[in-house]
Image (spheres, rainbow, N blue to C red):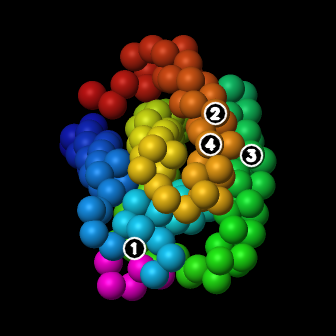
Amino acid sequence: MKRASSAIRVGCLGLTCALLWSAVANAQTAAPPEAPATLNAVDFNFVGQANLGAPFQIDSGRLAETKGTSAAIRSYANLMVTSHIPVVDALNVILKQKNITPSNTLLHGAYDALISTLEADRHAAFDRDYVNGQVEYQKGNAALFEQEIQNGTDPDLKEFARQTLPKIVDHLQRAEKLAAAAGGRLASK
């Protein structure tokens, strides 16, 4: 029974990540009514997702710094914490300069659910959920930043995305190496 509930939880976590990042990658074509007049739909979506994503990486990374069972996972988690703090700061500078307040998207609940799942996980389940979640997260995050670079219209946000994307690609490669190094031990099935 314990194995079945673990498989269901992992499946739900994977589904949550997949839904989360398909929403991120498929930016709206029309700006929602609450979007500032200065931002197009792509920029508005980018701001909302990036504003949630970096703090999520910090929060989940802090959990993994203490709960990860290997030095490699704890080291990766520390990188997530230390590298995302300046990202949050840089985005906040842009938002303050432009007097933009990101919307509180529905994805905030998904982030909260992912953090709750990680808080409840122990040992190998934590490692699996964290590392697999990181692979999926970084893929979606790269797509979000590429979407901004290609289709955004705000020059400051596009430059922020250009400067940040190489870090995201590096994080994705590191997460994939962690998953590969763990082999079947971290497989979600």
* Camera-side residue of 112 and 127: 112
Residue 76, compared with residue 48, is above or below; it is above
Q: Amino acid at mark 2?
A: Pro
Q: Quadrant of the C terminus?
A: top left
* Camera-side residue of 50 and 129: 50
Which residue, given by chain and number where applicable, does mark 2 sit on? 166
Q: Which residues are magenta?
A: 32-36
N-terminal of the pair, mark 2 or mark 1, is 1
Which residue, given by chain and number where applicable, does mark 4 sit on? 162
Q: Nearer the viewer, mark 2 or mark 1?
A: 2
Is residue 68 shown left or right of residue 140?
A: right
Q: Nearer the viewer, mark 3 or mark 4?
A: 4
Q: Amino acid at mark 1?
A: Thr
* Camera-side residue of 151 and 116: 151
N-terminal of the pair, mark 3 or mark 4, is 3
Is residue 97 shown left or right of residue 26?
A: right
Label 2, label 1: how many angstroms apart (C-alpha)? 26 Å
Q: Position of residue 144 (x, y in %)?
A: 44, 48
Label 2–label 4 contact, CB within 8 A: no
Is residue 17 shown left or right of residue 154?
A: left
Label 1, label 3: how many angstroms apart (C-alpha)? 24 Å
Q: Residues within 10 Å of mark 2 (few under 14, many from 20)?
A: few
Which residue, given by chain and number where applicable, does mark 3 sit on? 83
Q: Nearer the viewer, mark 1 or mark 4?
A: 4
Q: Position of residue 7 (x, y in %)?
A: 26, 39
Q: Residues within 10 Å of mark 4 (few under 14, many from 20)?
A: some
Query: In the image, which disc is placed on residue 105?
Result: 1
Residue 118, compared with residue 113, is above or below; it is above
Residue name at image x 66 percent, y 36 percent:
167
